[in-house]
Image (cartoon, rainbow, N blue to C red):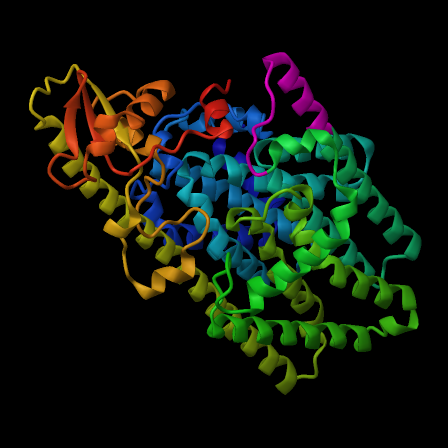
């Protein structure tokens, strides 16, 4: 078949709303995250992941290795950024398809918000997994789209895709859960649907989520068995095999609701990016969505069928729980910003309400006023998201430069140590003190969360060795754990002053010893297990 005929066939198969969502997401994503795609900005994990085979079965991510093969397991921001935006844009097209959007403008806004959402910036700080994680988002969305269409073949494929998504990163199960909820909510508000048909759809989606999660867990157990591995003692992963803490579930549910409210409406809280400006914008967006919803209820007379209104209100009340589902499946640790990407579907719910209700508002004044107000608010949210993402990149880039400066000076002191020939073992005790590198910039406090240090990216002792080897090309091997402990407990080491004082770098027993801290912090069981992962 000639290429022009193939292109024409694809164009006919892709609807205007799908094209609008895809192109808006792709273009916005490239503009907002351009700095990340044209620079190499490692966080603490990224220091050791210039090349990494992504064998993360020990973290429950058994599919991550296969999802990362497109970039040959190497941090290549331009290529990874391209693949990531293609997958995310396909996900945006899938969202508007699943929710049955009619408006191209609102579909475009959906793509824009998915690309500019602040949590995506945290994903791109883990550049070595970014394309795989965006693929996981797309797989979760595609799974819901297939199951919504019905039929056993599509449903089975959807279950497999959800398992693959969770096998890449478990937190993206929340994307499938939240989108499934919105699909049923959309059906409740569709006057052509029936109670029986809506209930059947809801049960089908619930079954798909349960089977997909069970399939993920079953495949994980096979991988652990075949590779003779155990889950890491990290973010509560090792506790997952001991059963789910049912008794804690009410408290976890309350925590999820609090996290969602705090994320959107409470400025100055931890693990959020909210300022008074964004809180006001979010409140206005919520109010406008409510106006559209009630216009739909009144004009379509949905109150005549109580199950529609009751079902819609119940599902809307459950939406915070759905978008925060990552906290439910990770009960032993707090959700980090990168685990909260599904929160973007709160804006998806707003756009759904607008898509259904805007045309039903009294014309011309009311409909036009609400349309313009919603557009202005969403543009404000997008600009704010772009600002937050680039603040993330700026702070992380500065931390990397500070680490580069410190590590370069430290390496110079090592190489100028009397007696050093390059063959000696180098024992660096301690991590880089943050007080020597603090970037005292007030705006950085807004994004100083889990994976964005504003002082240095080398937060642990081992990171210094990663930096020497992978970033400065200095072949300085990290000594064995026993050597680090033995040297740190010696009387000669205890008598040394702290770096950068004279005498803080000495030749002791044929080794170059550097004293950054008074005591050595032994590696955790998680770190030791991670180094032996397969």
Count of picture labels:
0
| 333 falls in the magenta region | no
> Which residue occupies 19% across, 39% down?
499
Q: Is residue 424 positioned above or below 41 on the image?
A: above
Residue 119 appears at what percent x and percent y? Answer: 49, 52
> Which residue occupies 53% across, 54% down?
114
Residue 314: quadrant of the picture: bottom right
Q: Nearer the viewer, residue 52 or 486?
A: 486
Residue 244 appears at what percent x and percent y? Answer: 74, 38
Q: Does the image show residue 198?
A: yes
Residue 372 appears at what percent x and percent y? Answer: 54, 77
Q: Is residue 312 positioned above or below 235 on the image?
A: below
Q: Nearer the viewer, residue 369 or 133?
A: 133
> Which residue occupies 21% across, 37% down?
407
Give the quarter of the figure containing the N terminus.
Answer: top right
Side of 459 relative to 403 (left or right): right
Secondary structure mostly seen in magenta is helix
Q: Is residue 45 positioned above or below 178 on the image?
A: above
> Which residue occupies 75% across, 40% down?
209
Residue 165 appears at what percent x and percent y? Answer: 62, 35
Residue 465: quadrant of the picture: top left
| 220 falls in the magenta region | yes
Side of 428 relative to 389 (left or right): left
Q: Nearer the viewer, residue 459 or 348?
A: 459
Q: Does the image show residue 164?
A: no
In the orientation shown, which residue stands out farthest toward the bottom?
365
Residue 362: quadrant of the picture: bottom right
Span highlighted in magenta in the image = 215-235
Side of 33 relative to 516 (left or right): right
Q: Is residue 415 positioned above or below 355 on the image?
A: above
């Amino acid at each position: 078949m000639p290429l022009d005929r193939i292109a024409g066939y694809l164009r006919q198969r892709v609807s205007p709303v799908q094209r609008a969502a895809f192109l808006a997401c792709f273009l916005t994503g490239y503009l907002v995250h351009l700095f990340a795609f044209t620079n190499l900005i490692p966080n603490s994990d990224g220091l050791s992941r210039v090349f990494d085979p992504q064998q993360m079965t020990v973290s429950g991510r058994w599919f991550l290795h296969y999802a990362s093969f497109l970039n040959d397991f190497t941090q290549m921001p331009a290529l990874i950024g391209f693949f990531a935006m293609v997958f995310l844009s396909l996900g945006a097209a899938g969202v508007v398809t699943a929710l049955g959007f009619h408006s191209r403008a609102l579909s475009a806004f959906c793509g824009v918000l998915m690309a500019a959402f602040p949590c995506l910036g945290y994903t791109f700080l883990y550049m070595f997994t970014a394309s795989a994680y965006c693929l996981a988002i797309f797989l979760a969305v595609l799974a819901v789209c297939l199951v919504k269409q019905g039929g056993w073949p599509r449903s089975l494929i959807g279950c497999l895709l959800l398992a693959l998504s969770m096998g890449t990163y478990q937190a993206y199960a929340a994307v499938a859960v939240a989108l499934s909820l919105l699909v049923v909510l959309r059906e409740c508000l569709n006057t052509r649907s029936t109670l029986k048909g809506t209930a059947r759809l809801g049960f089908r989606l619930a079954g798909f989520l349960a089977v997909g999660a069970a399939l993920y867990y079953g495949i994980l157990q096979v991988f652990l068995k075949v590779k003779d591995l155990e889950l890491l003692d990290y973010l509560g992963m090792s506790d997952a095999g001991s059963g789910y803490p049912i008794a804690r579930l009410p408290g976890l549910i309350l925590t999820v609701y609090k996290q969602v409210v705090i994320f959107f409406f409470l400025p100055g809280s931890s693990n959020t990016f909210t300022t008074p400006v964004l809180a006001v914008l979010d409140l206005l967006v919520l109010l406008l969505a409510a106006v559209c919803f009630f216009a739909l209820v009144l004009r379509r007379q949905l109150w005549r069928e109580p199950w529609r209104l009751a079902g819609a209100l119940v599902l809307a009340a459950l939406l915070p729980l759905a978008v925060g589902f990552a906290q439910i499946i990770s009960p032993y640790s707090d959700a980090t910003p990168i685990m909260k990407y599904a929160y973007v579907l709160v804006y998806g719910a707003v756009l759904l309400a607008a898509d259904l209700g805007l045309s039903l508002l009294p014309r011309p004044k009311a409909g036009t006023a609400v349309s313009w107000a919603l557009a202005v608010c969403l543009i404000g949210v997008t600009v704010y998201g772009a600002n937050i993402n680039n603040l993330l990149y700026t702070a992380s880039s500065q931390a990397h430069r500070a680490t580069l400066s410190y590590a370069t000076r430290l390496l110079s002191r090592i190489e100028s140590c009397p007696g050093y020939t390059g063959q000696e073992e180098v024992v660096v005790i301690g991590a880089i003190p943050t007080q020597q590198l603090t970037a005292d910039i007030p705006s950085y406090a807004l994004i100083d969360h889990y994976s964005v240090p504003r002082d240095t990216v080398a937060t642990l002792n081992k990171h210094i060795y990663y930096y020497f080897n992978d970033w400065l090309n200095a072949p300085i091997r990290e000594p064995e754990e026993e050597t680090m402990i033995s040297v740190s407990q010696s009387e000669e080491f205890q008598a040394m002053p702290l770096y950068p004082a004279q005498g803080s770098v000495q030749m002791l027993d044929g080794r170059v010893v550097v004293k950054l801290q008074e005591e050595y912090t032994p590696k955790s069981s998680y770190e030791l297990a991670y180094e032996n992962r397969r």
